[in-house]
Image (cartoon, helix red, strand yellow):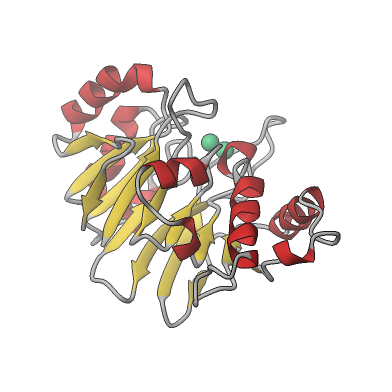
Amino acid sequence: MKVFFIGTSACIPGKGEETASFLINEHILVDTGWCNVLKMKEYGFAPEKLNYLILTHLHQDHYIGLPQLLFYLGMRKADGIHSPQWPLTVIGPSEKLEYILKKTEEFLQVERFQELSLQLQPYVLIPGKIYEDENIRLETMSAKHVSGADQPEAALVCKLTDKHSSGTVCFTGDTSYHPPIADFAKGVPILIHDSCHTSADDAAATAKAAGVDRLFLIHHPVSANAEKLREAQAVFPASFLAEAGKSIEI
Ligand SMILES: [Zn+2]
Ligand SMILES: [Zn+2]
């Protein structure tokens, strides 16, 4: 399994940066960042190979690149260039997923430009449930995350296996410190943990309790890199920064 970090930064990316999002085995995208299509092309990937989009939760910084992605895929489809695995399965943690996909299609005027229609397959995956088909198995638990008004936000912590390659990866999406993640991540080699809503040392404590081989910190401001790494390694030496433009092999 190969995980490629397209972006690693906080909610609003700085110049040349992209918000936390990554590509698994070139066909599973986790969150869209702000401008993933352009970033994927810059890094030599073909967005039309995607057949799964997993939205860890429905905060804007995790789906704001959706119109660009769907427009790009629609244009490629109209050109006759598309993945044999389409339609694209879009997985997210609440009914808001269907609302956002519908609004995005309206924004793209798909009704007027039918050639852009992708026949998306939304799949609402309530945190704690499992999605499984012939390609992937996605186990989930609930993250500990809130919205602006301090309301709990449906948000997925995920354990993903791509059945066509060996390896499983666990990623938290946005979460405050949430010790049950350690149990959930037991037996998984790699944990990719939010280090924006959780302090780096608490993320490291979770990784240590889970017994993972390596921890990757993601979603904090890039300017905090050195400090975050130092804090995490003090608790769990096998802590690393997720680095945009780089991949990890599992
Ligand atoms: Zn976020
Ligand atoms: Zn969030």
Whether residue 31 is visible? yes
Q: Which residue is drawn at 72% across and 30% down?
A: 149
Q: Where is residue 242 in the image (x, y as percent from the top left)?
A: 30, 37
Q: In which quadrant of the rendered image does the N terminus lie?
A: bottom left
| Image: 126 above or below 14 | below
Q: Position of residue 192 (x, y in %)?
A: 33, 45
Residue 167: which quarter of the image?
Answer: bottom left
Q: Which residue is drawn at 30% across and 49% down?
A: 191
Q: Which residue lies furthest to the right in this view?
A: 112
* For residue 113, side relative to residue 150 (left or right): right
Q: Position of residue 216 (x, y in %)?
A: 28, 40
Residue 87: which quarter of the image?
Answer: bottom right
Residue 96: which quarter of the image?
Answer: bottom right
Residue situated in front as seen by the camera: 195 or 51: 51
Q: In which quadrant of the rendered image does the C terminus lie?
A: bottom left
Whether residue 122 is visible? no
| Image: 88 above or below 240 | below
Residue situated in front as seen by the camera: 103 or 75: 75
Quarter, ligand 2 = top right
| Image: 139 above or below 238 | below
Q: Which residue lies furthest to the front in this view?
A: 79
